[in-house]
Every structure is written in C-alpha cells, then in structure tokens.
Image (cartoon, grey):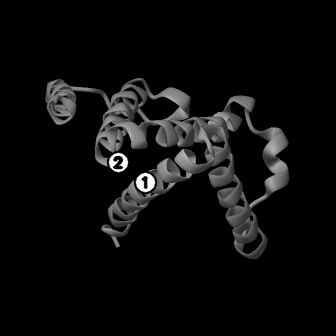
Amino acid sequence: MKLIFPLLALIGGMALAVQSQINGGLGKKVGVIEGSFISFSVGTLALLFILLFFGNGDISAISTVPKWQLIGGLLGAFFVIVQVIAVPKIGVSATLMAVIVGQILIGAMIDHFGLFGGNRFPIDLKKMIAILLLLFALFLYYKK
C-alpha cells in the first residue's frame, strides 16, 4: 500500500509527458490559445462526468473557501499554454525537465516556509546540493 502513491505519481508524470506532446501538436494545428482551450474543455467535461457519477464532496462549499484557493485552474491553464508553446520548440523532454526543475524549486520553497497552509519541511545542505545539481542537469540537457 505504501507504493501506491509514488506509483500513481509516476503514472501521472507519464500522462503529463503524453499530454505535452498531444497539446503541442494540437496547438500547432489550431493555435496556442485555441489548443489550450480545447484541452481544458475536454478535461472539464471529463471531470464533470466523473463528478456526476463519483463525486461525494460538497461542491456548494466553494463559497466558503479562501478565494486564493480558486487560482489553481488559472495556474493549470497557464501550464497548458506553456506546454503548447514550448513542446514544438524544444521537445517534450526538455520542456518537462524544465517543468520538473521549476516544480522542485518552488516546491522546496513552499515546503521550507510552510506556505499555503502546508507543513514545514526545511531545506538543508543536502537538499540545496540536489537542487543545484538539478539546475546543472537542466543546463547540460538543453545546452547545444
């Protein structure tokens, strides 16, 4: 059971790579904003059907959440637009490598300071070295 969450994250990462290529190709054919809109629309419809058949939360509680928690969709839309723009120019692997480094950089700051209501996981020297190695890896990967 301990492996289920890392396995799900691994599969999610694989899906993200496939999504990147699909969205990049879609954007080349229909346009960046149009491709992003189509991608989000299909995802929204899928989530609507999942919500209708499997949802067990309280969607009406949206009025009680802090308003800043509603920007997740905007950040997701921004990410899809970045995929559509970057993948045709630098490829899926370079795009995702930069995305992962960006996620880890911000994730480390969020963890270190306990931002957005999260638990604190301080950055130590070992983590700093790992982050610097990631930045160096991105540099090496993308350098021509």
Q: Residue furthest bottom?
A: 53
Location of residue 113 with respect to 45 vertically, above or below? above
Disc 1, SS: helix
Q: Position of 115 compared to 5: left or right?
A: right
Q: Amino acid at mark 1?
A: Gln
**Whole-percent x, y for residue 74 in the image:** 65, 36
Q: Amino acid at mark 2?
A: Val
**Whole-percent x, y for residue 65 in the image:** 75, 38
Location of residue 100 with respect to 129 vertically, above or below? below
Q: Which residue is mark 1?
A: 21
Quarter of the image with the C terminus is top left
**Whole-percent x, y for residue 15 in the image:** 43, 61
Q: Residue furthest front?
A: 29
Q: Quadrant of residue 113?
A: top left
Q: Are marks 2 and 1 in contact (CB under 8 Å)?
A: yes
Residue located at (70% from left, 70% from top) = 50
Disc 2, SS: helix
Question: How many numbered marks, from 0 up?
Answer: 2
Q: Which residue is mark 2?
A: 92
Quarter of the image with the N terminus is bottom left
Label 1: few (<14), some or many (≥20) within 10 Å? some
Q: Position of 83 compared to 124: left or right?
A: right
Q: Relative to the observer, which residue lies in front, 96 or 58?
A: 96
**Whole-percent x, y for residue 127 in the image:** 20, 31
Q: Quadrant of residue 110?
A: top left
Residue located at (40% from left, 28% from top) = 106
Q: Relative to the observer, which residue lies in front, 126 or 97?
A: 97
Residue located at (15% from left, 27% from top) = 136
